[in-house]
Amino acid sequence: MEFDSGPGTSDTPAPERSTGRRGRIVMLVCNGVVGDSRVQKTARSAAEAGWEVTLLGRSPDGRPASWRLGPAHVRLLPVPTPLAHPPRTARRPLLTRPLAYRPGTAPYRVQRVKAWRDELRTRRAALTAGAAATGALARSRRPSPVALPRAAARLVRPYAAARLALPRAAARLVQRWVGFRTRQLDRRTALRGTGTLLDRAAVAWWQRTLKERCWRRLWPSLYDFELAYGRVVDELRPDIIHAHDFRMLGVGARAKVRAAAEGRPVKLVWDAHEYLPGVRPWQNDARWLPAHLAHEREYVPCADAAVTVSGTLAALLRSSHRLAEEPTVVLNAPEQHTTRRSSCEARREAGESAADSAVPSLRALCGIDTDTPLVVYSGAAAPQRGLDTMVEALPALPGVHTALVVPKPAAGYPRELRARAEALGVAERLHVLPYVPYWQVVPFLAEADVGAIPLHHWTNHEIALITKFFEYAHARLPLVVSDVKTMAATTLETGQGEVFRAEDTADYVRAVRAVLDDPERYRAAYERPGLLERWTWEAQARTLDRIYTQLLQSAAQERRDHQEQPEGDRNADLCGGAREDRTAAGRPVRGQGTSRDGRGHRRAGGGERQRQGGAVPR
């Protein structure tokens, strides 16, 4: 990664349009960029293909930052989230748990009563220590002016206990009362995930009243991203906006509307990383998923092109959003140069020193030699990822080490895994390591013997070939994969690994033993002609480049038509460009069905807002 000499800020002026460049692309993502390999590869490859690319991400520490990713420019923006804390989250649940604390009060009360009890214990200890010291002085042969008679010393200890008996009893009683009220609040908080009757009624009311616009009431925090990104996108004046995943779709769509109002056509690419109905809500709140689903439904019609990570997900998106065509599949495969050259060479070409570009040794970090069997997992750490299965299996795999390469090794779930390994007596064979830069992942993982993907059965796990699948393949690792649909089928078809029943530790042990007994049998699958070549980012980047080129040509045609349009003609679709252009191009427009879907024009509530059968061309 090439860093600028100083951090950027959100006030950085928009760059002038470079002569000879193919066009300006602004990419949007709601994370800190560094751990997202798909986003980084998309920005870098587009910039290397001649596009002027600015990637806008969310600052993890609230401070603006800026650096270069090859020829691409990365900027992290502060995203204040006051809308993430609506008044309802601070109210006491009077109807369902009238004795519960107000949210935010419970931790203070719990800590305060703990401090009280600790103070009483300290006072009692001080009185007891004073009594013991006095007794010692009384027994000493040397007279002391402060020594009490021996009989008086014997009376100090029971007096100290009696003096503190009432406060200690009161503290115990208060602690029980605080614990009860805290548990009441915890139960109310737990219910928020499934929704109380009042929560479900609120969701149903706003869905019925506002339709797709209901997210503004159910989850207004989505607008925090608009307030942080919107002005910056407008200042950059892009030709194409590439919105990564569902949160950024609305930001890109609204920027497109504002540009169209200025007579400046902007094309929007929606990059769907996940199937939103199958996502585990990021927050324990019954409103989260309905709000985000409505947000996605509202802005999908604004997309001029859609891409996603697998054919299965493409079919689901077409069905759920009634798209005219399936989104184009762009696999999150590794870059080919990392499989045939060292990362050091690639980084030196980017202008970085050899010291900064050296790939760390996985086995050295684990403290093991080349003869020690090593199973590796690389990716996010969460219970649904099945990492507990890998830890529970270690006692049944003597001599085998397990490495977990995760974003935050010190986070709560990795700490739980280490504690479980300690309890099982295998802590020395579990290694929790941090991420390496995405261009180092393949050579870093290649030192392992087995690549594990122990996912649980969740919708998004069933439908995708996830990033680590391709990274393991390019590292030529035999795989041990749980029986999630798409990855299990691909693994069995290619013969590159073994499949086990998800959450079944004994079956996982069987699969690992099978691979370790004959690893070359599974590595041989990677010698199949064209297999790894098809699973490279370079092939995916060419697909994206074709999409960008077609969209830029379409935007240029719209500009020409707009200039020829008689003054006062308002027959324009702010979300989809000029109607005549889209019809001439053979693509459906907002509110207009296609010959394939059989739907006609239908006007939705709200006057000007219209529903579209499918506005996402290939």
Image (spheres, rainbow, N blue to C red):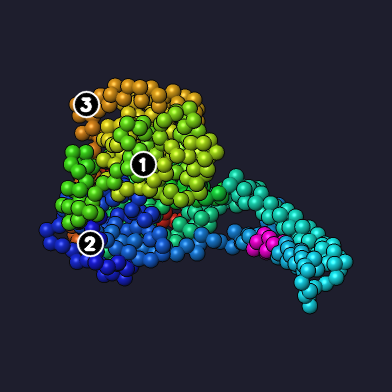
Which residue type does callout 2 highlight?
Pro
Q: What residue sits 60% from the left and 49% below the top?
A: 192
Q: Is residue 411 left or right of residue 361?
A: right
* Residue underneath mark 1: 367
**Extreme right residue here?**
151
**First of labels 2, 1 by sequence position:** 1
Residue 398 in which image quadrant: top left
Rendering coords of residue 558 (x, y %): 22, 54
Question: Pointer 3: what residue?
Answer: 527
The reply to whether residue 269 is in sight is no
Local secondary structure at mark 3: helix
Distance from disc 3 to disc 1, alpha carbons, whole Å, reads: 31 Å
Residue 370 is a magenta residue = no
Residue type at the position of mark 3: Glu
Of residues 511 and 277, the one nearer the viewer is 511
Report the span colored magenta. 108-118
Instruction: Name the N-terminal-most of marks 3 and 2.
Output: 3
Rendered residue at 22%/26% (across/down): 527
Measuring from the top left, give residue 246's x and y in whole percent. 40, 49
**In this view of the protein, can residue 50 be seen by the observer?**
yes
- Disc 1 marks a residue whose amino acid type is Gly
Q: Is disc 1 placed on a helix, strand or loop?
A: loop
Identify whether 599 is placed above or below 4: above
The residue lying furthest to the left in this view is 20
From the image, which quarter does the N terminus lie in? bottom left
Q: Residues within 10 Å of mark 1 (few under 14, many from 20)?
A: few
| x 41%, y 64%: residue | 62
The Cα–Cα distance between marks 3 and 2, rounded to whole angstroms, is 62 Å
Q: In front: 615, or 80?
A: 80
